[in-house]
């Protein structure tokens, strides 16, 4: 091996008169920053679309005649607030940039489920009906019609957007969309029988959580 030429020994030393040394280029640092900003914007758009879709669907389909009764109005209000809070938990990042912990997601999933099925057992005077397969299918299909467009919107927004726990976070977002579907059908269906509300209106939460978990598992990992 030939020894290096004398002038080559000083090639790695920056020239004090030649300006500052060139810093290493981080090609995707700016891209990551823009991506975070765009993701927040897309999340806001998806949330606004979901709200407009839910209100518009309920108005077009028609509100139930007893929607102003305390039990019914309370159920709808609490479930809507719960959906908003659980969705925030599923998408928010902490100050360090990391998402909510696995324990926090499990708490949000459990609270969402308990608040729905717990309040669904409240009874209010009104239309009673036996729980039958046709009644379950009818209300479940209506709930899915409400839940699927928000699910598509959030699946596009959150695609490859979960740094941690993509399956659980997907399940939480899916359950939120299912809960919104349950709110939509409950605002229209006049049946007050607790078993009907819990099963026919609540099955959309289960379907949403399963679908969201699958989407998060296969498409949500960043």
Image: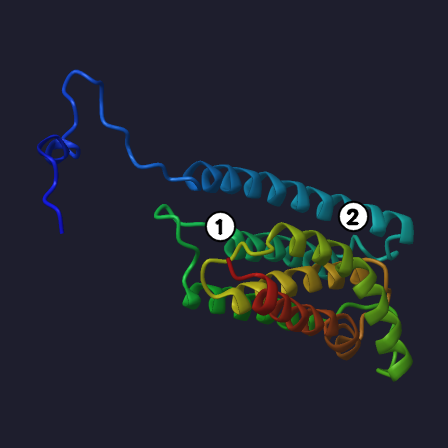
Chosen colour scheme: rainbow
Mark pair 2, 1: CA separation: 22 Å
- The residue lying at 63 percent from left, 71 percent from top is 214
Q: Position of residue 124 (x, y in %)?
A: 77, 68
Task: Give the class, few, some or many, for how many residues have Cα within 10 Å of label 1's Cα (few <14, many ≥20).
Answer: few
Residue at numbered disc 2:
53
Q: Is residue 180 above or below residue 8?
A: below
Q: Position of residue 15 (x, y in %)?
A: 16, 23
The earlier-in-sequence mark between 2 and 1 is 2
- Report the side of 221 relative to 129 (left or right): left
- The residue lying at 53 percent from left, 68 percent from top is 168
- The residue lying at 83 percent from left, 61 percent from top is 145
Q: Which mark is residue 44?
A: none
- The residue lying at 86 percent from left, 53 percent from top is 63
Q: Is residue 210 above or below residue 187?
A: below
Front in this rendered view, residue 36 or 202: 36
Residue at numbered disc 1:
92
Q: Quadrant of residue 100?
A: bottom left
CB within 8 Å, label 2 to label 1? no
Task: Give the class, few, some or many, for how many residues have Cα within 10 Å of label 2's Cα (few <14, many ≥20).
Answer: some
């Amino acid at each position: 091996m030939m020894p290096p030429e004398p002038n080559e020994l000083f090639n790695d030393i920056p020239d004090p008169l030649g300006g500052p040394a060139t810093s290493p280029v981080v090609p995707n640092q700016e891209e990551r920053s823009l991506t975070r900003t765009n993701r927040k914007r897309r999340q806001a758009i998806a949330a606004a679309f979901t709200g407009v879709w839910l209100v518009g669907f309920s108005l077009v389909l028609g509100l139930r005649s007893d929607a102003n009764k305390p039990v019914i109005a309370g159920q709808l209000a609490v479930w809507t607030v719960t959906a908003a809070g659980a969705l925030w938990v599923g998408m928010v990042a902490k100050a360090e940039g990391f998402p909510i912990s696995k324990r926090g997601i499990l708490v949000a999933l459990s609270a969402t489920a308990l608040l729905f099925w717990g309040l669904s057992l409240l009874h209010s005077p009104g239309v009673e009906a036996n729980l039958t397969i046709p009644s379950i299918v009818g209300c479940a299909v209506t709930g899915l019609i409400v839940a699927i467009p928000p699910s598509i919107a959030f699946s596009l927004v959150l695609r490859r957007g979960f740094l941690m726990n993509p399956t659980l976070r997907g399940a939480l977002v899916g359950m939120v969309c299912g809960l919104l579907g349950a709110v939509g059908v409950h605002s229209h269906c006049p049946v007050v029988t607790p078993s009907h509300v819990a099963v026919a209106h609540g099955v959309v939460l289960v379907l949403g959580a399963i679908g969201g978990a699958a989407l998060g598992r296969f498409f949500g990992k960043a």
